[in-house]
Image: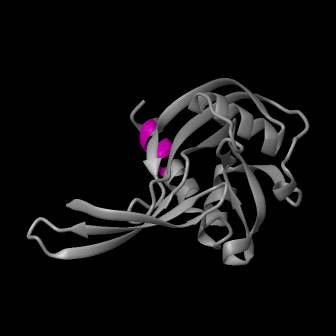
Amino acid sequence: MEQVSSRVVYRNPWMTVREDVIRHPDGSPGIYGVVEKADSALVLPRWARGFWLVEQYRYPVGRRAWEFPQGSWSSGGNGEPVELARQELAEETGLAAEEMSHLGHLFEAYGFSTHGFDVYLATGLSEGAPDREISEQDMQHRAFTDEEIEQLIVSGQLVDAPSLAALTLYGLRSTRG
């Protein structure tokens, strides 16, 4: 596939939307809408019997739901993914981790977006006070057992695709040692 042209149709501090005219391998024309979004980090804060989760209102879907702590650098920020993971964990939950293990890099919706995320397992947790951004002021956090997390998934209270993918990655890694 070859890009013929590209134009930005929308931009804000968190994302850029562009429209690309492409040529397929057989020469036929096509079009792609692409959302460019900086990569982020997602943290699985593990305690003895489960994980810590955060719950907040997500405006695009008009509802509250549970998910794992996650986010990207604030405007102009940058650094190593593990630093971002530590920052998001502390900011959203107040937790600090003795150890951060990288489980993998996944893509959220690569059919239309460049956004990827690094998944970290946080262990050896100690509690502190969250330091949330203004957009996270209604966020809650708490520890759940593995069984409670399964019930959140089944009942539709944990529906965040990156969180579910990260949990699957954790499950695959933990069963293989």
Q: Is 106 placed left or right of 68 in the picture?
A: left
Q: Is 119 placed left or right of 140 in the picture?
A: left
- The residue closer to the viewer here, 172 or 62, is 62
Figure quadrant of the N terminus: bottom left
Which x, y percent locates residue 113? 45, 60
Which x, y percent locates residue 38? 55, 48
Decide whether residue 25 is among the magenta residues: no
Give the extent of the magenta segment.
Answer: 168-173
- Magenta segment main secondary structure: helix
- The residue closer to the viewer here, 47 or 56, is 56
Decide whether residue 171 is among the magenta residues: yes
- The residue closer to the viewer here, 94 or 76, is 76
**Placement of 101 over or under 33, stated as above or below:** above
Task: State the residue lying farthest toward the top.
Answer: 98
Residue at image position (89%, 56%) is 137
Residue at image position (66%, 47%) is 71
The quarter holding residue 47 reads top right
